[in-house]
Image (tube, rainbow, N blue to C red):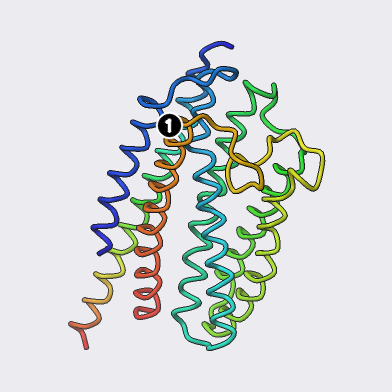
Amino acid sequence: MPANWGYVLAAYGLAAVTLLAYWRHLARRARALTTRRSVRTRAA
Amino acid sequence: MTRALGWLAVLGLVAGLAAGFGYAPSEAVQGNVQRIMYLHVPSVLTAYLAFMLVLLGSMGYLATRRPRWDRLAGSAAEIGVLFTGLTIVSGSIWGKPTWGTWWTWDARLTSTAVLFLVYVGYLLLRNLIDEPDARGRYAAVVGIVGAINIPIVHFSVKWWRALHQPSTILGPEPSPLAFPLKVALYVNIVAFLLLFAYFLSRRIEIARLEEETA
């Protein structure tokens, strides 16, 4: 069986990119909503 | 609490990589490509857990109409779709060098694709309905019906003749894995469950903020 490291790297690389992108999406969304809430609280 | 979970997940993932690439040896038949198992199996188990929580949240919402159950279901579904996607992609990459194909309409692969599409549909449905109670009720029905797919996916390799190997763990027979491979797999499963708990905690908080600012 050949080493096949390329497949291993592709699988782990894609997973890492996907999980980091989701983490970043959550962080941005949370920040945007927290800002929106504090703007509303100040305006009220 | 959420931050601590995040750091625990990071530590778990680092330990998982060390166990999968440092501690566990190259598998005798498949060679290094078998190391994809430490990503593939934890991903699908995390997805199972996520969709079980969708079922729980959906039943809880229909029984009580409390928004927190709907938040749990919607948040778990989103993360479940993420991990099912990772399962399909990592399995496809693993399939090419071992089976000679990226994809085949095998019972396990097909039922997993159906599971993925059902919950993508669940998320689309949630986005289509603005009224919170109607969204919660309709989504709960899909969430409960969709959960029927979980045992179908898991037992598909027993119920039908499949190219996919039988369950490595959670099967009726003892696991065929050698000890170091089993240790690496369990470390990665714990790491993925910690990551899931972290994502779920953050996603539920976002869902609560979305309701507050709607």
Q: Residue at x 49, y 44 (%)?
A: B42
Residue B24 quadrant: top left
**Which residue occupies 48% across, 18% down?**
A5
Which residue extends farthest left?
A42
- Give coordinates of residue B174: x percent, y percent: 61, 41
Q: Residue at x 73, y 43 (%)?
A: B157
Residue in the picture at 58% in, 20% down: B30
Of the pair B126 and A9, the residue shown nearer to us: A9
Residue B202 on image: x %, y %: 34, 63
Mark 1: few, some, or many residues within 10 Å (few <14, many ≥20)? Answer: few
Left or right: where B12 falls relative to B112: left
Residue placed under numbered mark 1 in the picture = A13
Q: Quadrant of residue B211?
A: bottom left
Q: Residue furthest front?
A: B174
| Three-letter code for the amino acid on which mark 1 is drawn | Gly
Q: Secondary structure at mark 1?
A: helix
Q: Chain of mark 1?
A: A
Quadrant of the snapshot with the N terminus of chain B: bottom left
Q: Is residue B71 above or below residue B21?
A: below
